[in-house]
Every structure is written in C-alpha cells, then in structure tokens.
Amino acid sequence: MTSPATTDDPGPAAPGSVPPAVPAGDSATAPASARADIGFTPEPTLVHERVIDWFEVHARDLPWRAPECSPWGVMVSEVMLQQTPVVRVLPRWQDWMQRWPRPIDLAQAPTAEVLTAWDRLGYPRRALRLQAAAQAMVERHSGEVPDTAETLRELPGVGEYTAAAVACFAFNQPEVVVDTNIRRVHARAFTGHALPGKTYTSAQRRLAADLMPDTAPDAGATACAWNASAMELGALICTARAPQCEICPVADLCAWRAAGSPAPTEEQQTRGQGWAGTDRQVRGAIMAVLRTGDPVERDQLLEALPLPEASPEQRSRCLDSLIRDGLAAQTGALVSLPGA
Ligand code: SF4
C-alpha cells in the first residue's frame, strides 16, 4: 500500500463545472499548451523526483498512511478530510475506527450513534453517506471496499475525488487524484498562476493527467507517490495564503516564481466561506444540542440556541432542513437525532 495522502484544504476538486475525465498517463490527449502559458515549463520528471523525495522525509506521520491501515481506514479518512483539517479529523478518525473497524460495523450502527461520533467535523451528511456506502459494500461487495475507482463511484455518496483517492492510496491504482491542494501546486509550479481559481477547468484536468508519471515501469507506484506528495506539498508548503517558497523543493523550477510571483487576479481569487450568521452555524448549533442525547422539545431547543443574531425564522428553517436531510427527526413536539 502506498502512503495515503492527506488534505488540509481538500474536498472534491471540482466545485464548479466538471469536465470529462482523462485517464492517467494519457498525455496524447493533453495538449502541451495546458502547461506554462507564461513561457517557462518545468520538467515534470524532475518535479516528481524532488517532491517525492521531499515527501519521504517530511510527510506527516498519520495513521491512515501506515502500511497496516485498511482500505476502509483510508476511505474513512478521505471522507472526513473533505472540508475538515487534519488536526480535527485525527481524534475522530481514531475513535471511528475503534468503534467501526470494518464497513459492516458501521453499516449496522444506529444512525444516532453515527452522527454523535461524527461530533463537530461539520457537514454531517458525510456521516450518513459514509454509512450508506458501508451498507452498499455489505450488500454488493461482501463487506469489502471495492478496489477500483469505477466500482467505488457506484457506491452512494462517493464522488470522483473520493473514488480516485481511495483507489490510489488504498489499492495503488494510478488514478489522477486532484484536490484543491494539488490544483494549487499545479497552477503555481506549472502554469505560473498565483491560484487555480474556483472552478476545476477542462485545461486543469488535462494538465493533471498530463503531469502523471508514466505508469508502465512500476505499475503506477510513482504515480501514486506523486499524488500523495503533491497533495502534501500543497497542504504544508505551497499553501493558499503564504507559500513557503524558501524551503520548497521545487523553488528553482517553479513557474510562478520564475514569473516574479504575480498576485492573484480577481478571477483566481476565491472568497472564504463565512460562518457567523449563516445557516451552517445555526444547523451546527442545533446538531450540538441533539448530540447530547435525549429528545428535546422543539420550541425550547430553538429558543435556547446561543445565537442572539439568529431570528426565530432562521432557527426554524434550519431545523426543518436538518429533518429533511435525515440528520434530525421530530415526533410530536419532540426533536432528536434519527432513531434516538
Ligand atoms: S516555489 Fe513556492 S509557489 Fe512554487 S511550488 Fe514551491 S511553494 Fe509553491
């Protein structure tokens, strides 16, 4: 098993439109013009070597990277790491794997317990999707994690990014793995852009495929290592706000540096999502109450939320949306986690 990658700023790589997939190593379909539109083109093989060497020394020691970690452990980590930083995922992943070390364990767990164990990782629908995927693995795959991206994609709630990442990091399949960290590294090192922009474009997809190491000599081992290494470089060194170019292993090869480190254009900039006052904050506050256990009277629950700015309408709307999403249930006037 290769070292599974980790993302600090991950999630599906394509928040906008999703162009058709390009297979790994299919450079015949990837135009050279996808790279280095500033006239400076680093040699991909040299970048691969440098970044993979750097990863071998500096990669974080994380349990889902351990050789003994199961494909299920890799999959759980990939789902948790979407939208949530490593430091918050780590204790939840360890607790989760103790409770439910196999897909069948999670498949049979009460939904209320699953949502309670998800704790404050955010976007709790991920927990429900992970349980649905585990149930599908039990029904269709003898309780095992499928070992190809194509089969993984057929599981409920598993998207392009998760399928590629699990196939690569758990099963050494040389899939093109692209999260926001990798997109940023590609944009800077190979095209000279300060940031990749919000949308995962067709050109970026072709570039990612074009940059994949040849899979023939080692059955994709270097390709998987490149995925993990580029992701870690983006998470630790080539960060969105403050890249540490002075300690970057490809500083002398980087197209963005060669172009004089231009500032991001308006189009490349993405605004961070606010939190205070949003429905996400109110939904999170309601879930925090429900995770404490016993059913609670609806009006009492909503009135007691410690969010003075949230109107009664917003509180009620957010609770209704949680019920619609299957994250809460109401019986009469009482509200609880589903099945609690
Ligand atoms: S030199 Fe700087 S911008 Fe270029 S890849 Fe390294 S950290 Fe990123």
Image (cartoon, helix red, strand yellow):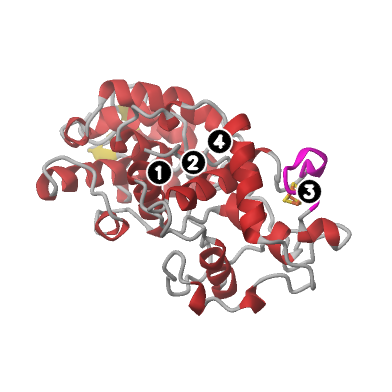
Mark before the other along the chain sequence, 2 or 1: 2
Ligand 1 within 8 Å, label 3 CB: yes
Q: CA distance from mark 4 to mark 3?
A: 26 Å
Q: CA distance from mark 2 to mark 4?
A: 13 Å
Whole-number angstrom distance, CA of label 2 to CA of label 1: 7 Å
Q: Which mark is residue 5?
A: 2
Distance in Å between CA atoms under marks 1 and 4: 18 Å
Question: Would you say the magenta stretch is mainly helix, strand or loop?
Answer: loop
Report whether the residue tagged 1 is closer than 8 Å to ligand 1: no
Q: Secondary structure at mark 2?
A: loop
- Three-letter code, disc 4: Pro
The numbered mark, 3 or 2, whose residue comes first in the sequence reads: 2
Disc 4 is placed on an element classified as loop
Residue position for label 4: 85
**Disc 3 to disc 1, C-alpha distance:** 27 Å
> Mark 2 against mark 4, which lies toward the viewer?
2
Q: Comparing marks 4 and 3, which lies closer to the viewer?
A: 3
Q: Tell me if mark 2 has few (under 14), some (14-19) or many (20+) residues whose alpha carbon lies within 10 angstroms of its own.
A: many
Q: Which residues are magenta?
A: 243-252
Label 1 SS: helix
Mark 2 touches mark 1? (CB < 8 Å): yes
> Where in the figure is residue 42, as x and y percent of width and height?
72, 62
The residue lying at 43 percent from left, 50 percent from top is 317
Q: Which residue is mark 3?
A: 251
Q: Is residue 184 above or below residue 144?
A: below
